Image (tube, helix red, strand yellow):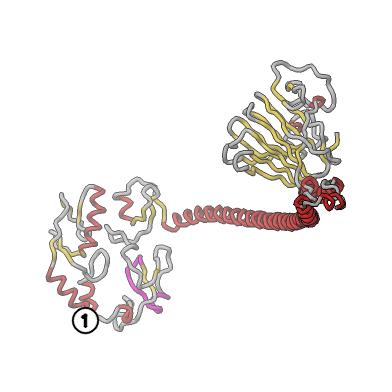
Amino acid sequence: MASADLSQELECPVCLSIYTDPVILRCGHNFCRVCIERVLDTQEESGGYSCPECREEFTERPTLQRNIALRKIAESFLSTQPDQEEAGVFCSNCVDSSVKAVKYCLHCDVSLCGKHLRVHSKAPEHVLCDPNTSLENRKCSVHKKILEYYCTEDAACICVYCIAGQHRGHQVEMLDEASEKKKKKLRNVLQKLMAETEEAEKRVQSLEEHKRKAQEKADGETERVTALFRDLRRRLDDLEKRVLSDIMRQAQQVTQSYNDVIRQLEIKKEELSRKMRHIEELCNMTDPLTVLQESDTGDLCDTEDRERHDKQLHDGGDLDVAGISHTLHTGLSDIMSGQTSGLPVYADILLDVNTASNDLHISADRKTASQADRRQNRPKTPKRFQNDQVLSRQRFSSGRYYWEVDVGGSDKWTVGMCYPSMARRGDQSVIGCNNKSWCLYRYYNQYSIVHDRKDIRLPDKIPSDRVRICLDYEAGQISFYALCDPTRHLHTFTAAFTEPLHAGISVWRGSIKISGGIRGGERSVHW
């Protein structure tokens, strides 16, 4: 019991623990240096200082004098105490024996064992906590009372004395009530965060699926292009071998022809040399009779032999370069026509004046559409647009095509593809504002991809005045590209086409021009 009494005498009134570096105020009360400095810092904001124990007021911040004697007593006491974790906290009501406490009542400032806890008041103000819990944050640092209230204006937990003091006139709530309100707000925030997390997870899954499909498509294209070039190399190797073999064969024939003529000429040279020697002998003879009786030496110029040699060299004495070139060009043409048959081809787009709005001017070559200076007086037909739009004369029901547009002459335009059944009047007649059209749209410096009124804003300005539109009807794809260096892919629509498609354009300022041309006339383009 003496130890327990000494322990109470050595407790700091603020932290309720054994003094640590104790200091003394002018009024004679002792505190831990850290505890009293924290209290004085809090009082400094209110403009006055006072002792937390006796409430004596000071005109200036009091000087803290170290209490050396008290510090030695506290240190000596702590050295004689068993480890706190082993000793634990004992019940304040068990005066005859040391019984470990199971709870601590903040209201009564007592530790309770299981027996005394059962008979303890269950009123709401009797807040119970773990007996080893630090009480420094549970009690008011100024008044040493339980923090039972919450000041909504200062967002601070306060005691009953604070209500009449520093927080006089403020909106005050019970801690439980304030806690429930905060929990309600936190639950609302939690619900929003859970919804955002779920949405983010869905987007991640969607993006992962798009990434997977894009990778699969890239892998498929890589395999297709690799196979194409592998086949090209094989065909080129075969063509090279065939052409080189033809060249070698012809070279052997030419060499053989020249060798035959050279051999015949060598034989002819020997015969001529023999005749020359015989003639020289006759010329050196002195007997006229012998010279005159010698037989004729024959014709020295054998014209038939020369003509025969010339014909022999003409027939096989030179390479057939024209034939080799023909074989080479024919082979290359066959290879390219076989390998590029599946690639997109240019579409020679011509604008259909019968669909053009009377606010558009269509050039004589049917390639350029521009905002008309005055309204055109064209006949009213079911195909004519009320809005500033026009479709192409061509319609595409199969195949792969692309066409290009020079949009440098306007800053407000639309280019895309449309079904012929698209409305010609009203909101549903605007390209992109229905489920029968797909387009790239520019409004001044803002670019968007639009289908069925769903607007996908492009993040950057298109770095080119030329746009390419590609159609793969069987694959159900319409793609848009900016023809810069390198070519930039803008967007690809995917759909199951149920009608033929026409090229469509709108222009509200300036003009835009179509370019391109079909090679060889495709059967899937209908006029």
Would you say residue 394 sits in the magenta stretch? no
The secondary element bearing badge 1 is classed as helix
Q: Hey, what amino acid is under mark 1?
A: Thr
Along the line of sight, the residue nearer the viewer: 263 or 183: 263
Along the line of sight, the residue nearer the viewer: 203 or 178: 203
Magenta stretch: give its range. 106-118
Q: Mark 1 points at which residue?
A: 80
Q: Which residue is drawn at 82% across and 36% down?
A: 395
Q: Which residue is drawn at 31% across and 61% down?
A: 145
Residue 86 sits in quarter = bottom left
Relative to 465, does residue 471 appear above or below in the rendering?
below
Along the line of sight, the residue nearer the viewer: 202 or 304: 304
Residue 129 locus on image (x, y percent): 39, 69
Q: Residue at x 64, y 39 (%)?
A: 482
Would you say residue 111 sits in the magenta stretch? yes
Q: Can residue 256 be seen in this view?
A: no
Q: Which residue is drawn at 76% across and 35% down?
A: 517
Quarter containing the N terminus: bottom left
Left or right of 36: which side holds 393? right
